[in-house]
Image (tube, rainbow, N blue to C red):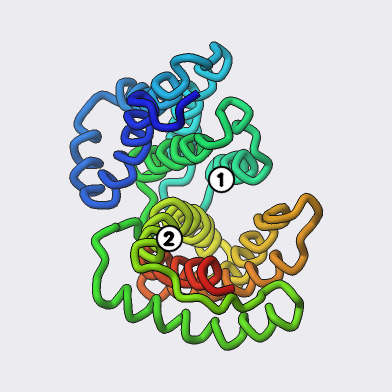
Amino acid sequence: MPIWTPNVIAALIWAVAPIFAFGLAGESIVRFLQKIPLTLRLIVPTVLGVPYALAGSHWSRGNWLVVYFGLPVIIAVLLLHASQSDPQQNGDWRDFAVLAVLGLAVDLRWLESAWPAHLSVISKLILLDSALYGFLVIRQLSNAGFDLRIQIRDLVIGFRELAFFAPIAIPLGIFLGFLHFQYRVPKISSAALTLAFTFFLIAIPEEIFFRGWLQNLLERRLGSRLALLVTAIIFGFSHFNKRSIHFNWRYVLLAAIAGIFYGRAWSSRHRVAASAITHTCVDTIWSLWL
């Protein structure tokens, strides 16, 4: 099957559109959606499952269609109950249940069998869209800091945390045999593509999940320092099966340390853009030279 058919391109655009919409005009979207009846507001997220129907026009199966159209609604309903039982936003069990299911679905690849391997990223985007709608529109969780309008201060904080992290991670990674220098000068186009791909498809999704939602909610229960540490540990363990079929403890350790600095970047002003900049720089440097 051709990789980039018109249906696949349409599905990718559909899956990416909510991320940009919420990232650039989230407050306006929330205000608009708050004006429609609650029942309709809970049905609206079914449209987030459309990318599967578009991309999978030749191979999609009914049971997966039910999952992709139904999961966003289930998330919305759970977070509605969370907002009703926990209006102070101290962290309801439903908040953490939603995050746990979404995190495990990505890490354990529960939904990837529904897609050809080259399109599995769209599945992750649908999950992200569903959570964005649930937490921003239904739960209206404060201090998440999901804003793609990058500010100078975001850059300063992001690069500051990179400067703190690199002298720790690079020597440790080399000592553990996890990192290896690659002496090459990448093409500008290749570096720019890597930077953009990492920022939008890796750093932003992971930072809104781990910092904007998880660390944000944990701060309300555990305090900022302990929430930072717990989130960093969970972030580290989320990399247990990356680049290896076995438990990759080196990756877990370095990712957990990285999570501390990503968390510091986010907590400085509660902005995902800041931690995403640190995250993007770390992953891009690793991809190009380590």
Q: Dot 2, crowdedness within 10 Å: few (<14), some or many (≥20)?
A: some
Q: Nearer the viewer, mark 1 or mark 2?
A: 2
Does residue 5 appear in this view?
A: yes
Q: Against 260, is 107 above or below?
A: above
Q: Against 177, is 100 above or below?
A: above
Q: How far apart are marks 1 and 2 (CA)?
A: 28 Å
Displayed quadrant of residue 226:
bottom right
In the structure shown, which secondary structural element does the residue marked by tag 1 occupy? Answer: helix
The residue under label 2 is 194
In contact (CB < 8 Å): disc 1 and disc 2: no
Q: Looking at this view, is 92 or 128 the one in front?
A: 128
| Mark 2 residue type | Thr
Q: Position of residue 215 (x, y in %)?
A: 52, 61
Q: Position of residue 63 (x, y in %)?
A: 58, 14
Of all residues shown, which one is farthest toward the top? Answer: 62
Q: Position of residue 204 (x, y in %)?
A: 42, 56
User: Of the numbered discs in the image, which one, if any, rests on residue 99?
Assistant: 1
The residue shown at (66%, 86%) is 171
The residue shown at (54%, 11%) is 62
Which quarter shows the C terminus?
bottom right
Q: In this view, does 90 lie to the left or right of 277?
A: right
The residue shown at (49%, 22%) is 70
The residue shown at (40%, 39%) is 129
| Mark 1 residue type | Leu
In the structure shown, which secondary structural element does the residue marked by tag 2 occupy? Answer: helix
